Amino acid sequence: MSATIQPRKRKAPPQRREEIVAAASALALREGLQSLTLRRVAEALGVVPGLVNHYFPAVDDLAAAAFAHAASAERNALFAAAPPSTSPLHHMRALLRALTAVQGDAISLLWLDAWQATRTRPALRAEVTHQMAAWRSDLSRLIASGVASGCFRTPDPPTTATRILALLDGLSIQAAIRFTIGYATVRDLVVETIARELGLEATLLRQAAVGEGNNGTRPDIPSATPP
Amino acid sequence: MSATIQPRKRKAPPQRREEIVAAASALALREGLQSLTLRRVAEALGVVPGLVNHYFPAVDDLAAAAFAHAASAERNALFAAAPPSTSPLHHMRALLRALTAVQGDAISLLWLDAWQATRTRPALRAEVTHQMAAWRSDLSRLIASGVASGCFRTPDPPTTATRILALLDGLSIQAAIRFTIGYATVRDLVVETIARELGLEATLLRQAAVGEGNNGTRPDIPSATPP
DNA sequence: AGCAATATTGGCCATTCGACCAATAGCATC
DNA sequence: GATGCTATTGGTCGAATGGCCAATATTGCT
């Protein structure tokens, strides 16, 4: 579990910093943002706590960086990494399939942690709003391209994106609480409402959410912990 | 701010217990569930921390009781305390007006805290699911009565209730993050979607959410802290 | 090869937390 | 009015945290 003792090794600051962020992100995804501790991260890296503190003088910054890493990775996997040849409709289907697949998955719980921790961590708060804006931007762009190509129909893509994201946030909570009774019905509501927002027949998206591609799991997110 | 020094006063256990729960609930609403500490609660009551620990051997139980107190109070104010003469439509309007009035209000933040703390607090987790079930039950009953009296139209009231609550949860997050840009549009989405779920014209509910009755604040929740 | 910059270490401190416990004092009952 | 039950006190303990600092050793550069 713990890294074997290493003779002191000196690494280039950017690389070390990235290592720390990756380890912190993996830890936050695995055990929650609350257990993101200087000591825990240091232990995961086989390093002294003070070193983590050296790169991140305030834990708040570390939490913000870890969250940014995890959130950006997922967003990138769902948007930028999508095959550019896919039509907006297929892309949206894949998006919904990924986002409604698993209940209680790590990334939903991480978002929940981040929303809550916003209360006491200004840097994390800034990062959360940044990531939310980035989501809105990416999704808005997808919707706009769908409208341009004629497969979606909505007057204002940014507004539609905001609405869809709020729906998915509510679903996130259902997922996080594992309020199993109710998750399926909420998922149906999400799919139906999104279809309505996009001017689609619900069936066009519904089959996406129930589809079994990707084995029901979200795309892998790069992890720092060695196997 | 702090209670004046009191000569040791002995109270009946049920009364003292209620005092503690009320103070804890007020504290959680004011400063978040994370700052619900034996010492903080004791300080608010002008009492020694050990006493709080005497009534609640585990902080988890105290948090659960405090959350139950706040959540039940709000739910009671919105359902049981509603004038029985009001029609289901009027009741639903009042409900939406109260729930969509303020962004970033204390009770939404408390729910967010509770959802998150569920990770590490079993007793609180049980209480959260209990309160969610109670909300669904109350709302379901309201919808059913509306269907019976002909002002709502939906095939399955419990399912509709679950969907509406998920919508409101998403709104709660928007409120908690104070993602001001977006709150209004999300609120509109919530109102429109709820109207659709209930087989209503959106305008019938929309005017409710924008209405200014109640001065835009939620109904008062009993607080324990003396003025 | 020598040297200087600095990444890294090890340690320490103050704080806060939940939990526990014996002693004390208030209240009800007799 | 005396007495016993127990609510309440005051204090302590161990664990965990974030932050800070001087010493050290590693690495890249001259």
Image (cartoon, coloured by chain):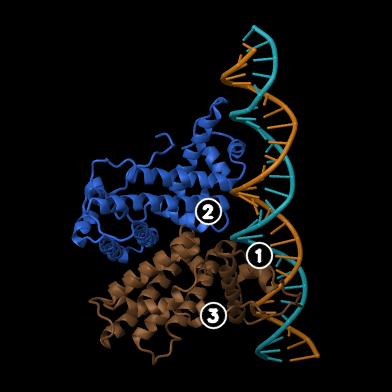
Chain colours: A blue, B brown, C cyan, D orange
**Residue at screen point 45% across, 50% down:** A131
Q: Nearer the viewer, residue C17 or A22?
A: A22
Q: Nearer the viewer, residue B189 or B176?
A: B189
Helix, strand, or loop for circle 1? Answer: helix
**Residue B152 makes an appearance in the image:** yes
Q: Given the image, what chain letter belongs to the residue carrying mark 2?
A: A
Q: Is residue B7 above or below residue D15?
A: below
State the mark number for residue B220. 3
What amino acid is at disc 1? Arg
Q: Nearer the viewer, residue B142 or B12?
A: B142
Q: Earlier in the sequence, mark 3 or mark 1?
A: 1
What amino acid is at disc 2? Arg
Q: Which residue is mark 1?
A: B39
Q: Is residue A207 above or below residue B200?
A: above
Q: Which residue is mark 2?
A: A125
Residue B190 in picture, x, y percent from top left: 36, 69
Which callout, 3 or 1, points to the residue nearer the camera? Answer: 3
Residue B51 in picture, x, y percent from top left: 65, 70
Apparent side of residue B131 relative to residue B13 in the rendered image (left or right): left
Q: Residues within 10 Å of mark 3 (few under 14, many from 20)?
A: few
Apparent side of residue C17 relative to residue D3 in the rendered image (left or right): left
**Residue at screen point 35% across, 64% down:** A179
